[in-house]
Image: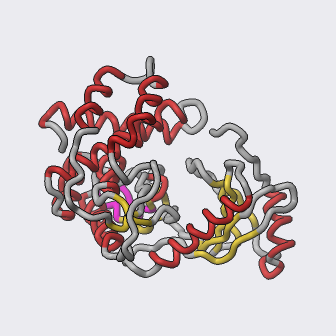
Amino acid sequence: MHDGQLTVPEATVRALVDEQFPQWRGLAVRAVRSPGTVNAIFRLGDTLAARFPLVAGEYGAVRAALETEAAAGRELAGRTRFATPEPVALGEPGAGYPLPWSVQTWLAGVTATDADPGRSVPFARDLAEFITGVRAIGTGGRRFRGSGRGGELRGQDRWMRTCFERSEGLLDVPRLRALWSVMRELPRGPAPDVTSHQDLIPGNVLVSAAGTGARLAGVLDVGGLGPADPALDLVAGWHLLAGEPRRAFRAALNCGDQEWARGQAWAFAQAMGLVWYYRDTNRPMAELGRRTLDRIVAASARSGPG
């Protein structure tokens, strides 16, 4: 999926665990099939998961990112009624693997990639409840920092130009450019940053049951937890929900038109990158991008953002 992507065999994981955490030598190591793009994931026994970064990087930067992820996991644990991974340990390079790695609690369940909850109103309300609970965690005066999603929409212009160029022949680029030309002008308003999960996509969401009876069981990949535009987590409405449940989601969060439109714009910016970047390497992610864009285009055609 990425230039210079690392390969992590089960034998390497076994060697690292046995050497660095001898208390877990008796636990089985099993690779986890996942559409995830950042980590190779392995189960350790029944209650733990080992996560190995796939993109090569400098030791200190990767270690700092894992420590930030662990701190986020501790901050979120128990703050909502939905399960989230909790940090257990950090591992060191070895056995041919060049980076630090992490161990978290394992959450049982099926991801929304495998069990689409998009037509479930109860799931939509659960999702809104999770976002509300995350927003209730104080930012401690922190503000969004960085150039990724969560600051100002215009800050995405350079990335969007790349996406439009790479999407020629894959998507209706003129129409999508026209939509972005409107979205990028959406005003932020006076609302301060709130704590956000920042990546509520199907692969990070666990569901129980299926179809119209689906419910939210847990949320994964909490390392991005931090302050951001209050509209950022509204991407979940477009990535995860069909029309009626999306309307229930919006109502449960009491979103005004401006905030809702910005959430749609953040979903659009994320989806534009998924189709071309993952078209040959991660089909579920590319399909997610197409589905989200289709939903946004359809909603805009009917009545503008909504």
| Position in image of residue 107 (x %, y %) | 54, 70
| Position in image of residue 148 (x %, y %) | 45, 49
Q: Residue at x 71, y 49 (%)?
A: 56
Asked whether residue 97 appears in the rendered view, the answer is yes
| Position in image of residue 190 (x %, y %) | 20, 60
Scheme of colours in the image:
secondary structure
| Position in image of residue 26 (x %, y %) | 81, 76
In the orientation shown, which residue stands out farthest toward the top? 169
Asked whether residue 211 appears in the rendered view, the answer is no
Q: Which of 101 and 194 lies nearest the eye of the viewer?
A: 194
Left or right: 258, with 229 as reference point: left
Quarter placement of the N terminus: top right
Q: Which of 7 and 216 lies nearest the eye of the viewer?
A: 7
Q: Residue at x 45, y 24 (%)?
A: 167
Q: Quadrant of residue 82?
A: bottom left
Q: Up-down: is 247 above or below 153?
A: below
Quarter placement of the C terminus: top left
Q: Quadrant of residue 230?
A: bottom left
Q: Is residue 142 magenta?
A: no
Left or right: 116, with 183 as reference point: right
Q: Which of 20 and 126 lies nearest the eye of the viewer?
A: 20
Left or right: 45, with 19 as reference point: left
Q: Residue at x 86, y 65 (%)?
A: 15
Total of numbered circles in the picture? 0
Left or right: 15, with 242 as reference point: right
Q: Which of 263 and 306 lies nearest the eye of the viewer?
A: 263
Q: Is residue 213 magenta?
A: yes
Q: Which residues are magenta?
A: 206-215
